[in-house]
Amino acid sequence: MSEHQTTPVSRRYRVYQIIGIVLALLFLALGVIAYLAGGGPIIAAIAVIGGLAVLIVSIITMVRS
């Protein structure tokens, strides 16, 4: 059986991807909070779209690496 060895470089990129997912979830939550607080649908939509974009890129990068 071959073992998958992780190098410090790949470990560092994995940390970046996890940070990206956390930030994406934060943006999604801020979008919902902004909408519920009366910030308007445009501000909420910007936060949600940004959060989804970061989440999708982080997941795709994590799967490809």
Image (tube, rainbow, N blue to C red):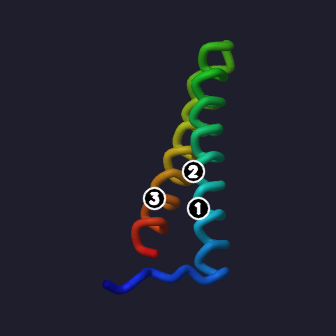
CB within 8 Å, label 3 to label 1: no
* Other residues around mark 3 within 10 Å, as few (<14) / some (14–19) / many (≥20): some
CB within 8 Å, label 3 to label 2: yes
Q: Label 2, secondary structure: give it.
A: helix
Disc 1: which residue: 17
Q: Nearer the viewer, residue 43 or 1?
A: 1
Q: Horizontal and vertical percent for residue 53?
A: 51, 52
Query: Which residue type does callout 1 highlight?
Result: Gln
* Other residues around mark 1 within 10 Å, as few (<14) / some (14–19) / many (≥20): many
CB within 8 Å, label 1 to label 2: yes
- Mark pair 3, 2: CA separation: 8 Å
**Image position of 53 (left or right of 13):** left
Q: Nearer the viewer, residue 3 or 21?
A: 3
Query: Which residue type does callout 3 highlight?
Result: Ile
Residue depicted at x 66% and y 13%: 38
Residue extending farthest left: 1
Disc 3: which residue: 59
Query: Which residue type does callout 2 highlight?
Result: Ile
- Mark pair 1, 2: CA separation: 6 Å
Q: Horizontal and vertical percent for residue 15?
A: 64, 63
Image height check: is 62 above or below 6? above
**Image position of 57 (left or right of 40):** left
- Mark pair 3, 1: CA separation: 8 Å
Q: Horizontal and vertical percent for residue 21?
A: 57, 50
Disc 2: which residue: 21
Label whose residue precedes the other's in the sequence (3 or 2): 2
* Other residues around mark 2 within 10 Å, as few (<14) / some (14–19) / many (≥20): many
Image height check: is 53 above or below 45? below
Residue depicted at x 57% and y 35%: 28
Q: Horizontal and vertical percent for residue 25?
A: 58, 40
